[in-house]
Image (spheres, rainbow, N blue to C red):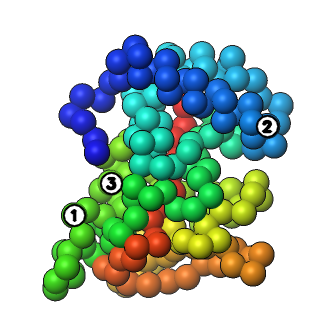
Amino acid sequence: MASQIKELSAEQQEELLSVLKNRFEKNRNRHQGLEWADVQAKLEAIPQKLWSLHQMESTGGEPDVVGQDKNTGEYLFYDCSAESPKGRRSVCYDWEGQQARKEHKPATNAIDMATAMGIELLTEQQYRELQTLGNFDTKSSSWVKTPEAIRELGGALFCDRRYNHVFVYHNGAEPYYAARGFRGMVKV
């Protein structure tokens, strides 16, 4: 999935910017008051962020701008695919959870995969904010960044949307399921 070179060719950049622009224009409700030209200028100034967005896109995340940090001015890109990104499913929560499996260990885990992609898992609050913009994970679920106090006790959190309500659940960090992946975010 992730190449050692964290840069995109000019052609890849152009293609990704086109995809992101089309998604931005199609989903104006996610980022009212923001202009694509401003977002694109920031993206072109930080090629590493374009690489991370490409990783999100190539794993099925459909990243889109969902807002702007009021303090830093950074644009917030979240995975906005209808279901948890297909290229990031069937993973344990973190390395410790992955190592705790006695058999059938997955190739990777959500935390290590996100780090390799240059993104962060959504927090529970960010996940809830995303759900105000549409109905996500109605058939799948997504690991979310778990508070350290819970993780130290062996637990991990995941969320989904069922019955028109956002649910937060707990599990050990070692299970993985075909319908559970993770959603990420990038600040640009």
Locate residue 135: give its quadrant: bottom right
- Disc on res. 113: 3
Image height check: is 162 above or below 125?
below
The type of residue carrying mark 2 is Arg
| Label 1 vs 2, first from the N-terminus | 2
Do callouts 3 and 1 mark residues in contact (Cβ within 8 Å)?
A: no
Give the residue at mark 1.
107
Please say whether residue 147 is visible from this viewpoint.
Answer: no
| Residue found 59% across the figure and 73% down from its top | 139
Amino acid type at circle 3 is Met
Secondary structure under the numbered disc 3 in the rendered image? helix
The image position of residue 181, as x and y in percent, is 44, 65
Q: Amino acid at mark 1?
A: Ala
Element at label 2: helix
At x 70%, y 23%, the residue is 36
Is residue 154 shown above or below 19?
A: below
Percent across and percent down for residue 65 are 65, 38
Q: Which residue is mark 2?
A: 28
Nearer to us in this view, 40 or 155: 40
Q: Are marks 2 and 3 in contact (CB under 8 Å)?
A: no
In the picture shown, does residue 128 fall above or below 114? below
Seen at 35% across and 18% down, the residue is 9
Counting other residues with Cα less than 10 Å from the Cα at mark 3, is it few (<14), some (14-19), or many (20 or more)? many
